[in-house]
Amino acid sequence: AAPGGKSILLNSFGFNVLAIDNSQSQIDKFKENLNRLNVKINIQKVDFLKAKFTQKYNSILLDAPCSALGTFRRNPDVTLKIDQSKIKMHQKIQIQMIEKSLKILNKKGFLVYIVCSFHPFETIEVIDKIMQKHKNIKIHNINSRKMIKRQNGYFINPLSFKELGGSDIFFVSVLEKI
């Protein structure tokens, strides 16, 4: 969930946000941002894959751990720190997190899967594997000129934000449990 930008945005739209993260240092950054903006959000230090959830949710925003390759504009050295084995490991965790999310998602609920990567193993392939396994999931379209549609999701078009100095590249797929 940290550093909190997406959670803060959802909160500003009136959503009741439960933000979870497994990293205390990330949670500390999130709390700094909450304090700076004078925003109140329930944030908990939890290992999502080990957590026991007693309720189901109508919507889940899964900002999954990834290689962060989409941040290379701001962090050029990210391309030197990653290899195929790490990306494959991320894919395994991403799929596990989606599987867990689907278990706690209500029927007719929405799961928004986001990663700051453009690598197919972390984006298109992850959603392909989920769609092959789950016949009760459908992909929703996003109508935005700032997004580039690919197979089963969208990539942010960083050029559509050039007047703001550009943007990272990230992938998003909106899944509905039917």
Image: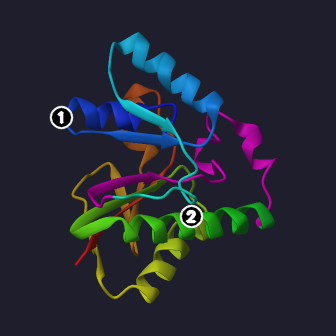
Residue 134 to residue 124: above or below:
below
Depth check, front residue: 88 or 55: 55
Separation (CA) of disc 1 from disc 2: 27 Å
What residue sits right under mark 1 in the picture?
14
Instruction: Determine crowd level at label 2: few under 14, some 14-19, many 20+ residues with C-alpha closer than 10 A.
Output: many
Query: Is residue 156 left or right of 139 when viewed as pictured?
Result: right
Residue 33 to residue 104: above or below:
above
Instruction: Determine crowd level at label 1: few under 14, some 14-19, many 20+ residues with C-alpha closer than 10 A.
Output: few
For the image, the number of numbered tags is 2
Query: Is residue 74 left or right of 139 when viewed as pictured?
Result: right
Q: Is 174 in the magenta?
A: no
Identify the amino acid type marked 2.
Gln
Q: Quadrant of residue 140?
A: bottom left
- The image position of residue 18, as x and y in percent, is 36, 41
Colour pattern: rainbow
What residue sits right under mark 2 in the picture?
94
What residue is drawn where x is 58% and y is 65%? 122
What residue is drawn where x is 79% and y is 66%? 85
Query: Is residue 72 left or right of 136 when viewed as pictured?
Result: right
Magenta residues, start to end: 55-84
